[in-house]
Each structure stands twice: as C-alpha cells, then as structure tokens.
Amino acid sequence: MGMNEFNEFKQKFRHFSKLCTEDYLIRYANKGLFKRALKELDQGVSVQYTWHAASVGCQLSEGTECTLHATLDEWQCSCPSENICKHVLIAILYDQRQQTVGHDAASEPSPVMHDQPEDSKVDELSEKEKGFEKDELLLVKESASHGYEWPTQSSEENARFRWMLGADLAPMLKSYTSTMVEEIVFRLRYPEDIQITEDTLLTIHLKSQDIEVSFTEEPNLTKALCKLKQTAGKMAKLEALLRYRIIHGLDDTEALSVRAYEPKFSLQTVRECREMLAGILRTGLARLPQSYMAQLETLAIAAHSSNLPDVERNLRGIEGELQLFFKRHVRFSMQTMLDRISKLYLALEVLVQSEITIKQQSQLVGSFRSKYFTVPSLHLYGLGAYSWETRSGFRGITYYFYCFDDGQIYTYSDVRAVYYEDQQFSFAEHYAAYTPWLPNLTFSQFTGEEVQFQSVKVNEERRISSGDGAKLSILPRTNVTELDFGSYLMDISSALQQQPDSIQLFAEPKERLAIIEVARIAEHTFNKQTQDLILTVENTEGERLPLTLPYSSDWQSMINRLESGFGSQKLEHFYAFVRFEGKRCSPISFLKGQTLLSLKLDSGSGRMGRFGRK
C-alpha cells in the first residue's frame, strides 16, 4: 500500500513537472533566477530524489536540500530565501531532463532543457518576446462600442484554456468571502483595458491597475500566477478570470450574487412593522392618534437593532411626514405619505414571504454603512453643491462631480443626524470648512474645481469617501461648453416631459439629474402659499422651464436676493444643473465658462453678482 502511494505521487509530480514550462517558471519566479538555475545545471549540478506519499525530498549535489509537492504553492528549502529560489527550480528542471533522457535520448529538447551558450539563450528569448508583442498581445476594451480579436491559435492550443469559459464558478467561489466577492463585483462595473498573451500560459494584464495574472491549463484558480500576495493576489485572479469570461459573453451574475449578498435580519421586527403600517391604513389619517408618532420611533429603533437599515430610514421618513400632518404644515403631501407607506409595506410583505433572490432580499434590507472600494483614479469636474434636510432628521451638503472616466456623476456628502436635540448642522460653517484631502482647500472651492483623485474609495452609488489614502490634485478647469455630458445634457422640452418616479422595490435609488442649456432667466416669482421661489428660465427657442426652490430660514438671504432679481438680469447663456423631485425641477447650480454658482450656498454671499459679470 505504501509503495503504491509513493508511485502515485511520483506520477503526479512527474505530470506537474512537465507542466512547468519556461514561461510558467519565469512568471512564477523571474527570468534571472531561471537563467541561474539553467546555468548551474549546465555546470553539472545533480539532484537525488527521495519519494514520499505526498512530497519528494531533493538533495542537490552542492549540499542544499529541498522538499517539493505537486504545486509551486508549497515548497521548503534549506537556503535562507523567503521566496522561491533557484534550488527549487533546479530540482524541477533536473527531473525534466531525466525524464527526457529516459524516454528518448535522441528527441528534440524542450526550451527548458537545451544546452546552448548563455548569450544564445538570451537572444532567442528576446526574439520570442518580440514576436509576442507584435503578433499575440491584444488590447481589449470592455465596452459595447469596442470590438476585439484573438490571435490565431490551433484547436489544440485553444482547448488547453477552455476550462476558463466552461468551468462552474460556484466551487471556485467557496474559498472567497462574501466581502471579497462583493468588492470584485464592484470592480467589474468599471471598464478595464486588458492585454491577453496566449502561449504556454494564458496571461491577462489589467492595465489601469497594472496587475498581471497568468493561468495554466489546469482548471484551478490557485494554480494561476500573480505577483500580488495573499488576499490581493487571490482577488486579482478571480477578477481577471471574470473579465475574460465577460468579453466572451458569459454572465456570472447569479453565481456572484449568491456569494456576495448574505443578509441577516429579524423577521419578528419585520412582522411588527408591517402590522403597525396596516393599522395606519385601516384607521386613516383623519382619525389617527398622535400616539402613532411614538410607535414609529420605537419601531425605528427596533429596526436598527434588527439589522434592517432601510426599514429604519423609511419609518423615520413616515414619522417626519406624519409630523407635518399633525402640525397642518403647508409642505405636507398626502401623495408622498401614501407612497412612503405603500413602498415600505410592500417591502415588508415581500421579506415575510421570502420568495425572492438573495440579492433582492439584500436590496430590501439595505445597509447601515455603504461599503467603499478603492478606485485607481477619478478625473472629476465640479458641478455644484446642494444643501438639504430630510423629514427623517438628517441635514447635509452634497457635492456633485461629473467623471470624465465613465461619464457618470459622483457625489461627496457631508451629513449629520439632527433628530437629537443636541445635534446641529450649520450649512455655512460646513461649506467653509477645509476638505480632508488638501489642507488649504475649502469645500466651497472644491465644488468649483476640476480635480484628479488617486486611490480614492467609492461605493456602489458612486459616493466618494473621505477616508485616508486618497490623493487629490487640482487641474486647470475646462470651459463648461467644451464638455460632453452625454445623457445628462437635456433640452427644456425633454425636461418638461419628465415623469414622477414610480414605486420600484428592487430598483437602486437613483437621483434624477440633468444639465440644461439656458439662454436667460425670464422671470422670478415667490409663491406665498407653497413658500417656493420659482425661477422661470428660457432657451434660445423661447421654451420655458420653471425651476423651484423651497423656502427655509437657512436660505432666507439667498431667497431674498434671488427674489429681488439681484444679478439675475446679467445671467445669460449658461447651464443649469438641476434635479427632478416628482414633477418639480429644482436647480442646484448655474455654470458659465469656468465659473460655478451653487444657488443655495453661494447666492447669499454676493457671488451671484460676480457670476453674472463673468
């Protein structure tokens, strides 16, 4: 039985040894180490092998001892090197030569067994590399507008890496945590330039990240080679494989979703919240006692403790809306109240039934804090800042940026919870504060700049993190007329046709934003009933669009200046950056040339007059 085990491992090791081609060993170690191993073999170093059940002892003639397995992921050597050493390579290469001599002494030697002079070997390798650069390196852009070609290969060569397209992902993902898979899924949303080299290995180079992964013909991710160590290398291997599958038209969404999303929450709290909402609907607002305010607060706290963040947010939103109702406030909206209750009730009903996918369940539960993942670089153009306050008790300022890299809008938000009495948030103070990335750059300056981030963390909603590690540099600001805003650029007629948001349980919440070219501000009025300032803008064709700004004591100075028309008569031929809220269109900022005016935050400081003179 013991002898059979030795023979079985010996055959397994011999098979592994044959797979250790020149390309494989060079990429696992490096070219210099490989050349030194060949040189010592040519100078007469020999190896004695002692076979065991799961390893082989290798005694080199110069005294070094190694223990090898049927993989390069595990080995031991008596030399002090912490990385793979020349002795391990010598033990593998010597076994290859012995097999070649034993089978056919007259056969043509493989590239790793020749006895050519050292200079000849270097020249041959250099010519080989030149050939790959010319004929077999291929740049692939993951975009529907870019095509890609493959180097001509024989059917035998193509078959060696067929496992990369045909393998079942589920077993491979078992060694990855849900957090790791979630980060890789996030990375895949960003387009990536890749180079593919196919020889004895299939090598994928992720260019923007400068990461190279080489796959063997063995269907095992652990056998792939990557210079990155530990978790980073493990994630790079999976990302490279997934990108390779994507450009071949494979969709791994389902397998990835099962591993990436694992929500855990209290069903008892879900049922209690559902019963309370049903009680509101049965009773009706006219007969609803104010005691429901306390019930909403209690259940919001319970939802927080039960890992139901989106339920907590929605309960606080309903509580804020109900508070407006009891105060008979002009801002109370019956439709908004009904929409909030309906959406939350439907979400709770679906969670109780548990007849949805894990990803959909995760979308309904939400998360307390978004997970942020590092993006190599972001080239951003400031679009403006918007101060806001929610009925669920939060205040903040959101800064908007257009990204040159992917044509999307990114945000940075400075937010505080103010539903406790001792919590306050001054818009003016926070707007004048310094950014965490550059010590002398205030947020009011930051929002009007064109910037370049390096190694910045971003979440799935394209929100930028203020965490350590990001580097920010200021670039010359491009004239707004020279930018292509893609689908965000909208004319007035299209803006007038915008429909209110429909209730969608599983759709990611997405702010509806647009950039509209404006010829002039035609008129401005203040609606005393709704407490709204309405700026009516007009384009060159005479089409008009009302822009609505709600009144608040924090923005009283701004409202007064805009209502009096301060500087607005001089505002001509500019862009309005707006957000759609139901049927209303609210302006965030005006852009002209290289300058920017954030209406809620800059108009009260006199910058509107300077903006109008630009």
Image (cartoon, rainbow, N blue to C red):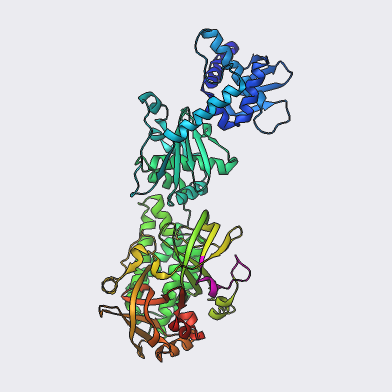
Q: Where is residue 468 in the image (x, y as percent from the top left)?
A: 61, 59
Name the residue nearer the viewer: 365 or 279.
365
- Could you tell me which residue is drawn at 46 percent across and 32 percent down? 132
Q: Quadrant of residue 579?
A: bottom left
Q: Where is residue 609 in the image (x, y as percent from the top left)?
A: 46, 86
Left or right: residue 129 compared with residue 364: right
Q: Quadrant of residue 86?
A: top right
Q: Where is residue 520 in the image (x, y as percent from the top left)?
A: 34, 82
- Could you tell me which residue is drawn at 37 percent across and 49 percent down? 143
Count of marks placed on residues:
0
Left or right: residue 38 compared with residue 266: right
Task: Give the prevailing secondary structure in the magenta stretch.
Answer: loop
Name the residue nearer the viewer: 333 or 459.
459
Name the residue nearer the viewer: 382 or 78.
382
User: Where does the magenta region start and end?
Assistant: 435-450
Q: Is residue 55 visible?
A: no
Q: In which quarter of the image is the N terminus?
A: top right
Q: Where is residue 378 in the image (x, y as percent from the top left)?
A: 50, 58
Q: Is residue 320 magenta?
A: no
- Could you tell me which residue is drawn at 44 percent across and 52 percent down? 190
Q: Quadrant of the C terminus?
A: bottom left
Q: Is residue 331 above or below residue 277?
A: below
Q: Is residue 137 above or below residue 54?
A: below
Name the residue nearer the viewer: 602 or 9.
602
Q: Is residue 579 visible?
A: yes
Q: In which quarter of the image is residue 67?
A: top right
Q: Does the magenta stretch include residue 446?
A: yes
